[in-house]
């Protein structure tokens, strides 16, 4: 897969899944925009891509803020003199807290970043893509969209909303040569999960995942790049688990038979 002459805007590009994807896109010829609220990380990632001979710029963005999103896209499109062809919405926050006293401010914040942020970036990118008659949007949802987890009141709700939003995008943007899909990573080793998973959580996940391991950034990148490629033109509105079989699995997790 090559992405020459494509401009890719990646939110959350300063860390984890977004960082891995933006590096892989640049290595395959894309002009990339590393967009993150953490501008130090975004700048580090963009510089390292430039050092490898790639085309990269860092831009600060708070995806939950409409004017910040607009400024970031304007800066990127001006810098490259190009419309946005590819959008990866990877910016996200967890906000773990018990349901019974889940703070409404935290709930609203998680929804603002994960859902409103995806909406705002897809809408801004979508306006450019509709004019160009081409676009690829990938939203990083989660298995949490369909499987509950302790403490994930807002996170799980936000990821389910992202899947619904993706379907809306696929219907309204599809006629313009644009696809919108959501991926559902299972647990992946990234700074986000390293900060929140206990050894017990990792062991529990490993025993429940048929592949018997957590996901890697390479697992995520391979799927994201495919959905962003020309070859994925007829995949639209999908919710694709990238989870080693976690969502598919049922009883009998040890694999022993009577
Ligand atoms: N790591 C996993 O196991 C896993 C599993 C399923 C889904 N996901 C999803 O994948 C995405 C990326 O997760 P990750 O593990 O790479 O996390 P991460 O914390 O490593 O990266 C998230 C990035 O988003 C940025 N960000 C946060 N709020 C932002 C905002 N308001 N505006 C712009 N940028 C903002 C952060 O600065 C960070 O660079 C998230 O949406 C997450 O929900 C992760």
Image (spheres, helix red, strand yellow):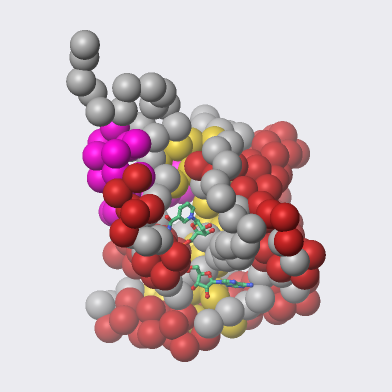
Q: How many marks?
A: 0
Horizontally, is 240 left or right of 114 in the view? left
Viewer-proximal residue among 156 and 169:
156
Q: Is residue 73 highlighted in magenta?
A: no
Residue that appears at 45% across and 37% down: 241
Residue 141 position in % (x across, y down): 55, 48
- Is 46 above or below relative to 104? below
Above or below 117: residue 204: above
- Residue extent of the magenta highlight: 205-228
Residue at figure coordinates x 38%, y 22% from the top left: 251
Residue 79 seen in the current view: no
Q: Residue at x 75, y 73 (%)?
A: 65
Instruction: Name the magenta segment's main secondary structure.
Output: helix
Q: Quadrant of residue 70?
A: bottom right
The C terminus sits in image quarter: top left
Q: Is residue 29 above or below residue 247?
A: below
**Residue 6 at least partly seen:** yes
Percent across and percent down for residue 53 are 28, 77
Residue 19 in picture, x, y percent from top left = 40, 68
Which quadrant of the figure has residue 168?
top right
- Residue pushed farthest bottom? 40
Does the magenta segment cover residue 217? yes
Please tell me whether residue 156 is drawn above or below residue 54 in the rendered image: above
């Amino acid at each position: 897969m090559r992405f020459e002459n494509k401009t890719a805007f990646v939110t959350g590009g300063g860390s984890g899944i977004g960082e891995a994807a933006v590096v892989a896109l640049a290595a395959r010829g894309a002009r990339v925009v590393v967009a993150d609220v953490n501008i130090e990380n975004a700048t580090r990632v963009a510089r390292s891509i430039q050092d490898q001979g790639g085309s990269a710029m860092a831009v600060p963005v708070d995806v939950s803020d409409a004017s910040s999103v607009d400024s970031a896209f304007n800066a990127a499109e001006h810098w490259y003199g190009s419309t946005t062809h590819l959008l990866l919405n990877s910016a996200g926050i967890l906000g773990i807290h018990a349901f019974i006293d889940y703070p409404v401010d935290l709930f609203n914040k998680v929804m603002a970043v994960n859902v409103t942020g995806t909406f705002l970036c897809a809408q801004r990118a979508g306006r450019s893509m509709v004019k160009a008659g081409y676009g690829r949007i990938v939203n990083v949802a989660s298995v949490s969209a369909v499987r509950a987890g302790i403490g994930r009141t807002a996170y799980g709700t936000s990821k389910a909303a992202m899947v619904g939003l993706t379907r809306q995008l696929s219907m309204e943007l599809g006629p313009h040569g644009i696809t919108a899909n959501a991926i559902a990573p299972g647990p992946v080793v990234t700074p986000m999960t390293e900060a929140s998973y206990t050894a017990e959580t990792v062991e529990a996940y490993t025993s429940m995942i048929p592949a018997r391991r957590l996901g890697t950034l390479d697992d995520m990148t391979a799927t994201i790049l495919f959905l962003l490629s020309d070859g994925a033109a007829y995949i639209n509105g999908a919710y694709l688990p990238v989870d080693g079989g976690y969502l598919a699995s049922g009883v009998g997790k040890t694999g022993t038979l009577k």
